[in-house]
Image (spheres, helix red, strand yellow):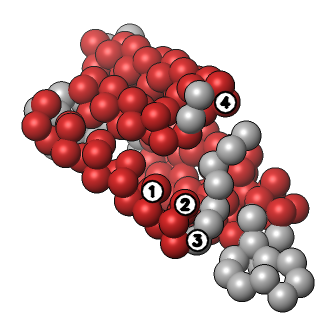
Amino acid sequence: MQKLKGDPLMGFLVVIFGLLFFVPGLGYGLSSPGNLPGPGAGFFPVITSGLTICFGLWIIYDGLKKGSVDYFGSDPEQRANFKILAIVCLAFVVFLLIWLFINFFLGIALLSLFYNFIFGRTWKFNLIFSLVLTALLYGVFEKLLYIQFAL
């Protein structure tokens, strides 16, 4: 199996993306203010972005170790990957707009449906996965932890 090209560059972008959420998350605080039980507003952003940063650093290390340095080659695989990356980024922007103007859970359900579709999942898997993901997010964050996803 051939190693994908440009892994260190993609790892760097993953680290930058993680830092974009890590730094503001620290400002929100890891613990809740006063006598309130539970984690603070910054707890989950710091944990998830910290893991994202670690994952990006691992991608960089692994890519450099394996010699993956063809960043902007012109082979068909890389051109197809850039197209998919652009579509994924555009879909995420649409998700943010839906979150901002309509509802987070509608946005996450549509984003999940779209991502599963473009990555070739079956409709049955796609619908079940999207419903379960949305229900879990709603149940855990809205009902158990009382965390609102409002912008």
Mark 3 lies on a secondary structure that is loop
Q: Are marks 1 and 3 in contact (CB under 8 Å)?
A: no
Identified at 75% across, 65% down, the residue is: 41
How far across and how far down the image is residue 51, in percent? 55, 64
How far across and how far down the image is residue 74, in percent? 38, 11
What's the distance in space between the residues labelled 1 and 3, CA to CA?
Answer: 10 Å
In the depicted structure, whether residue 143 falls above or below residue 116: below
Give the amino acid at mark 1. Answer: Leu
How far across and how far down the image is residue 48, in percent? 58, 62
Residue 105 visible in image: yes
Q: Specify the quadrant of the image occupied by residue 100.
A: top right
Q: Which residue is mark 1?
A: 137
Identified at 32% across, 16% down, the residue is: 80
Residue 82 visible in image: no
- In the picture, the disc for residue 145 is 3
Q: Earlier in the sequence, mark 2 or mark 1?
A: 1
Q: Which residue is mark 4?
A: 100
Q: How many marks?
A: 4
Give the amino acid at mark 3. Answer: Leu
Q: Which residue is mark 2?
A: 142
What's the distance in space between the residues labelled 2 and 4, CA to CA?
Answer: 17 Å
How far across and how far down the image is residue 69, in percent? 47, 35
Q: Earlier in the sequence, mark 1 or mark 3?
A: 1
